[in-house]
Each structure stands twice: as structure tokens, then as C-alpha cells.
Image (cartoon, rainbow, N blue to C red):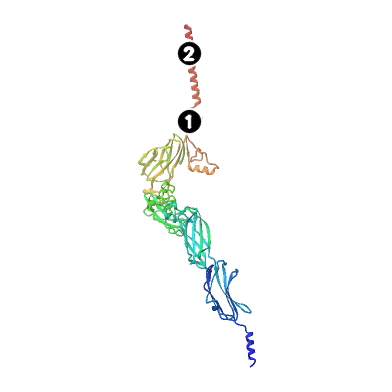
């Protein structure tokens, strides 16, 4: 039996001690610099020394607790080990390590992340005048509830906007989104005075991340506020009965509840308006019904008011829908910052799919002062016309309207002729087609320029239907009379617009101002000579007359002198 004790001792020496069972618990997987972390270590008593550390690959770390042989962790280190991460440590992955000092050191560890609160990314949309949009700031932090993102916009030594937000949406691990509202209307809304609005220009967006009463990160980003932009997309011609579908595109992306755009469809004795509601993409679609509308030309107006107008939307839409922002009255109603765009739309009858061109022939005229010139009001092609009426207007007193006549086959219902305007109303009972509506005689009264244009044109075709028209005017230049070598010449030069354009396109230089171009290939000049006077003959006649006259007087005087001497 004496051999049993040595055998047992030998077994103890030869059989290795089993690994120590150690459990490490950390209350957080990640922690911000300056925050506390709570650690629990559970291990049985052993006759070995034991150390508990926080370590990292960056070199930062600390010994949290040391145990001698057979000491209990809870007795020496406590139930919980609380440790505040120093603010000057580097961010990264850290270990809570339990080191058992044995023949071969035995390590047990648990990982956690140390994070410095900071801005990871910023999403800034295009900033539009008087807009209200979102700036997304992405922040890395271990504690989103205790983190604040502060934003202010700076320009001209003034802090315009201040916003503070706690990031609340976790985009990815430890990265949270702060949805900041950038309200560029804020300053205007305080006073309702357009002079206080934040104007387009360059500014600085100042961002800060604050945690635990300290600013950990900041950015200063140059930004620009731009003017509003609007684009209209819709067909030029629409058959009556089909809706007018208008696609609108703006640069107001993600604009908070913006409804400052008005759409107005205006025609003869017709007006309809709608407010435009933009989507997050800055786009919208409108629809106007055409049922019951007359055929003809309509104009679609889109006005971005920037929500600064002092009058109601109804008043603006009904009475000032085409008001130019540069107009003096626009400043009175705070509409000088408006953006106004327009587009012409033709509503067509099913039987008439295109507009009839009404123009002058010639469309460009050069004439010497004092001369008459005849122009024709013509159609683009010969069609059946049952009735028509129009008003002729002259833009200046350089020319005077003298007469207006209708072609054969038309009966005048009404005609009025004045130097600066004329009005005609005619009807036809025949079946013939025509390409001429009237012939107009005007006098070149003063040196200068004038434009003849047609207004209130109504053209009725077959079956009495009102036709859509595309009307253009005529330009007249009145020149000073220019005497020529042989006599006094008065020229009337007629320039055909189509051929004149062709000459300019094909030649290297534009034609001279007095170049005469007609519809024919060879340029022709309508020239009339009035008062053909040969000044050389006139001069010789006058010289002969005076010579004879004075010679006769001289001879008469000599004879008289001789008679008086004879009497003496």
C-alpha cells in the first residue's frame, strides 16, 4: 500500500490542469470616447495570479484589476468594473482581456468598439431661392440619443439659419441620419418683406457634431442659392376634346410643401388657373380639359411666385398672369422675384388639323418718302373662305393707310379706314377658293420705320367653321428721297422675305440695305421717274436768256446816248 501515495502524486504532476473557465460580460458593443463602460468577469479561484486589462492595437490600454492566488474577482475587483474611456484615446477595436499567469499564460478576451463622434457624409440638394428642403447629415456615434447635430447658414457676416437635430435613423451600424430642415423662407416669413428674403448667392453651411457637451467634429461647406427654374412640356397642337396634359419640371427638389407656382391657360374670352403641387423630384403634371372650348390660340403661363406676392393667388392669376417681373407694378405687389414662362397651344377642330397662315406680300419693304406702295393680305394656300374680318394697325406715323379693297367675289359688310388703322368685314357667297383677302395702299409719309400687323383676325372656312390662323406682319422702311445724276429719282424697293433669307444664308456677307430682291430669281426694282429734268439744258437756256437780255439793254443804252449827242 506504500506505493499508492507516490502514484497519486505522479498522476497529479503528469496530468495538466484543465483550462480555467472565465466569462467576460460588457454592457456595450460600442462606446463613444469619454463614455463609461461596465465590465463583469466571472472566474473560479485558482492558485495563480490573474490580471484584467483593456488593450488595443493602437497602444492605448489600462490595467483594470490584479488578483493574487486564490483571490476572488468579486472580492478584489467588485461585482462590476466601471471604466470611463479617456477622450484622448484613439478610436478602434479594444479588448477586455483576462490574463491567467501560468507556465503558459492563459488569455480570455471580449471585443468592443471605441468611437469618436463625427460626420461621415452630408447630402445637400440644390438650394433654390425661397425653398424649404432637407439636408441629410450622416453621423457615426455609439449613442445617437446623446448626440446633437447643429447646422447654421452663414453669409455676409450674418447667421441666417440655425437648426439642431438628434440623429434618429440608423442607416448602418453606428451610423445615424439627421434629417435637417433648411428653411430659406424663414427670414421672409418673419416680416413678409421681400427685402428680407435670403437672396441667391454664395453662402457657408456650418455643421457641428456635439456629444457630452463637447464638439467632436465640424464641417464648413460652401453652398449656393440659385434662382428658380421651370420647364414646360406639352403638345403644340391639340384636338378639341382631348385634354391638355402639361408636364412641369423645376429645380425645387424635396421642397417642403411648396405650392407657390400658378398655371394659367388663357385664350379669347377664356381663362383658367390651377395651383401646381410639386413632388419630391420637383416635378408635377397638370391637366386642362378642352371640351367646350373654341378652337384657336391659347397661351399657357407658369409663374413661380416664390410665395412673396402681396396679393392673393386668385387676383394674381386672373388679373396679372402675364405681368412681366421687370414691370414697375411687379415691385408694388412683390412679384419682381417671380419666374414667368409661357407656351402657345393651338386647339384644333377635327376637320382642321393645322393653322392657316395669314401674312403680307411683300413682308419687307423699302420705299422713298412720298411714294405709295401696295401690299396684299394673303393666305398660305388657296382655300374656301366664306367670311373674314380683321383690324389693320400701323406701329408709327412713318406710313399712312390710304385705302383697303377686297378681291372679286367678296361683299363688304363693314369697312373703316384711318391713317393709322383700318377695319374690314367681308363675306363671300361663291364657291371659289381664294388666296388673297385684301389689297392695302399705304403712303410713305415720314422717314422712319413702321410695322403693319393684323389683329382680331377671324377667318371662316367651308361650312362657316372658324379656322385657326397663324398671323405675321410686314415691316416698312421709309427712306429719304435720293436725287440721281439725270434727274430726281424715286425708288420703291420690294424685298421678298424668303429670297432675302436665302441670299443671307448662301453669301458670306449680308446683302446691302438697299438690295432689291423679288420673288423672281433676277432682282427687280420697281422704279418710277417723276420730273425728268435736264439741268444742263436748263442752265444753257437761262444763260442764253440772260445774255440776250443784258445785250439788248446795253445796245438800247448806246443808241439812246448817241441820239442825245446828235441833238446837241
Q: Secondary structure at mark 2?
A: helix
- Give residue 119's position: percent from left, percent from top: 53, 63
- List the single residue furthest toward the left: 413
Say if residue 340 shows up in the picture.
no
- In this view, the residue in front, 211 or 163, is 211
Q: Residue at x 48, y 18 (%)?
A: 549
- Give residue 526's position: percent from left, percent from top: 47, 36
The relative height of residue 236 versus residue 118 in the rendered view (above or below) is above
Q: Which residue is mark 1?
A: 488
User: Are there few (<14), some (14-19), or many (20+) residues within 10 Å of tag 1?
Assistant: some
Indicate the quadrant containing the N terminus: top left, top right, bottom left or bottom right.
Answer: bottom right
Q: Which mark is residue 557?
A: 2
- Give residue 433's position: percent from left, percent from top: 40, 45
- In this view, the residue in front, 304 or 40, is 40
Residue 444 falls left or right of residue 5: left
Callouts 1 and 2 close, C-beta under 8 Å = no
Residue 67 falls left or right of residue 549: right
Q: Residue at x 41, y 39 (%)?
A: 440
Q: Earlier in the sequence, mark 1 or mark 2?
A: 1
Q: Secondary structure at mark 1?
A: loop
User: Are there few (<14), some (14-19), or many (20+) residues within 10 Å of tag 2?
Assistant: few
Quadrant of residue 185 in the image?
bottom left
Closest to the camera, between mark 1 and mark 2, is 2
The relative height of residue 18 versus residue 278 in the rendered view (above or below) is below
Say if residue 30 shows up in the picture.
yes
Quadrant of residue 71 in the image?
bottom right
- In this view, the residue in front, 304 or 208, is 208
- Give residue 418's position: percent from left, percent from top: 38, 38
Amino acid at each position: 500500500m506504500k506505493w499508492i501515495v507516490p502514484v497519486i502524486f505522479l498522476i497529479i504532476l503528469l496530468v495538466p490542469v484543465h483550462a480555467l473557465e472565465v466569462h467576460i460580460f460588457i454592457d456595450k458593443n460600442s462606446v463613444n470616447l469619454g463614455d463609461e463602460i461596465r465590465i463583469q468577469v466571472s472566474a473560479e479561484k485558482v492558485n495563480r495570479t490573474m490580471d484584467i486589462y483593456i488593450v488595443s492595437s493602437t497602444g492605448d490600454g489600462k490595467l483594470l484589476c490584479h488578483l493574487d492566488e486564490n483571490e476572488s474577482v468579486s472580492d478584489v475587483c467588485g461585482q462590476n468594473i466601471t471604466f470611463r474611456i479617456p477622450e484622448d484615446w484613439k478610436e478602434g477595436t479594444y479588448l477586455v482581456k483576462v490574463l491567467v499567469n501560468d507556465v503558459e499564460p492563459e488569455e480570455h478576451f471580449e471585443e468592443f468598439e471605441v468611437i469618436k463622434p463625427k460626420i461621415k457624409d452630408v447630402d445637400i440638394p440644390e438650394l433654390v431661392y425661397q425653398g424649404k428642403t432637407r439636408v441629410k447629415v450622416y453621423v457615426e456615434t455609439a449613442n445617437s440619443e446623446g448626440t446633437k447635430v447643429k447646422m447654421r447658414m452663414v453669409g455676409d457676416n450674418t447667421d441666417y439659419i440655425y437648426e439642431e437635430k438628434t440623429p434618429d435613423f440608423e442607416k448602418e451600424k453606428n451610423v445615424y441620419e439627421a434629417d435637417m430642415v433648411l428653411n430659406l423662407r424663414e427670414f421672409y416669413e418673419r416680416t413678409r418683406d421681400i427685402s428680407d428674403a435670403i437672396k441667391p448667392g454664395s453662402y457657408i453651411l456650418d455643421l457641428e457634431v456635439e456629444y457630452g457637451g463637447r464638439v467632436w467634429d465640424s464641417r464648413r461647406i460652401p453652398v449656393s442659392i440659385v434662382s428658380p427654374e421651370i420647364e414646360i412640356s406639352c403638345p403644340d397642337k391639340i384636338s378639341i376634346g382631348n385634354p391638355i396634359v402639361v408636364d412641369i419640371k423645376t429645380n425645387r427638389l424635396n421642397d417642403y410643401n411648396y405650392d407657390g407656382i400658378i398655371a394659367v391657360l388663357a385664350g379669347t374670352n377664356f381663362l383658367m388657373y390651377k395651383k401646381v403641387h410639386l413632388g419630391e423630384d420637383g416635378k408635377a403634371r397638370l391637366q386642362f380639359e378642352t371640351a367646350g372650348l373654341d378652337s384657336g390660340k391659347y397661351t399657357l403661363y407658369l409663374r413661380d411666385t416664390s410665395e412673396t406676392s402681396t396679393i392673393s393667388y386668385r387676383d394674381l392669376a386672373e388679373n396679372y398672369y402675364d405681368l412681366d417681373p421687370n414691370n414697375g407694378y411687379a415691385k408694388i405687389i412683390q412679384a419682381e422675384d417671380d419666374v414667368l414662362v409661357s407656351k402657345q397651344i393651338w386647339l384644333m377642330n377635327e376637320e382642321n388639323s393645322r393653322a392657316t397662315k395669314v401674312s403680307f406680300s411683300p413682308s419687307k419693304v423699302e420705299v422713298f418718302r412720298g411714294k405709295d406702295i401696295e401690299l396684299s393680305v394673303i393666305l398660305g394656300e388657296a382655300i374656301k373662305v366664306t367670311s373674314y374680318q380683321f383690324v389693320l394697325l400701323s406701329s408709327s406715323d412713318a406710313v399712312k393707310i390710304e385705302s383697303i379693297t377686297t378681291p372679286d367675289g367678296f361683299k363688304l359688310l363693314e369697312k373703316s379706314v384711318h391713317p393709322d388703322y383700318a377695319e374690314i368685314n367681308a363675306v363671300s357667297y361663291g364657291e371659289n377658293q381664294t388666296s388673297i383677302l385684301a389689297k392695302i395702299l399705304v403712303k410713305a409719309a415720314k422717314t422712319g420705320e413702321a410695322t403693319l400687323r393684323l389683329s382680331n383676325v377671324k377667318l371662316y372656312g367651308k361650312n362657316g367653321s372658324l379656322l385657326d390662323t397663324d398671323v405675321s406682319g410686314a415691316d416698312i422702311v421709309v427712306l429719304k428721297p435720293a436725287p440721281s445724276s439725270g434727274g430726281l429719282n424715286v425708288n420703291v424697293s420690294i424685298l421678298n422675305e424668303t429670297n432675302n433669307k436665302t441670299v443671307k444664308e448662301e453669301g458670306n456677307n449680308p446683302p446691302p440695305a438697299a438690295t432689291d430682291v423679288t420673288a423672281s430669281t433676277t432682282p427687280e426694282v420697281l422704279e418710277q421717274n417723276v420730273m425728268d429734268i435736264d439741268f444742263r439744258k436748263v442752265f444753257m437756256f437761262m444763260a442764253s436768256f440772260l445774255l440776250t437780255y443784258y445785250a439788248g439793254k446795253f445796245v438800247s443804252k448806246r443808241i439812246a446816248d448817241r441820239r442825245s449827242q446828235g441833238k446837241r
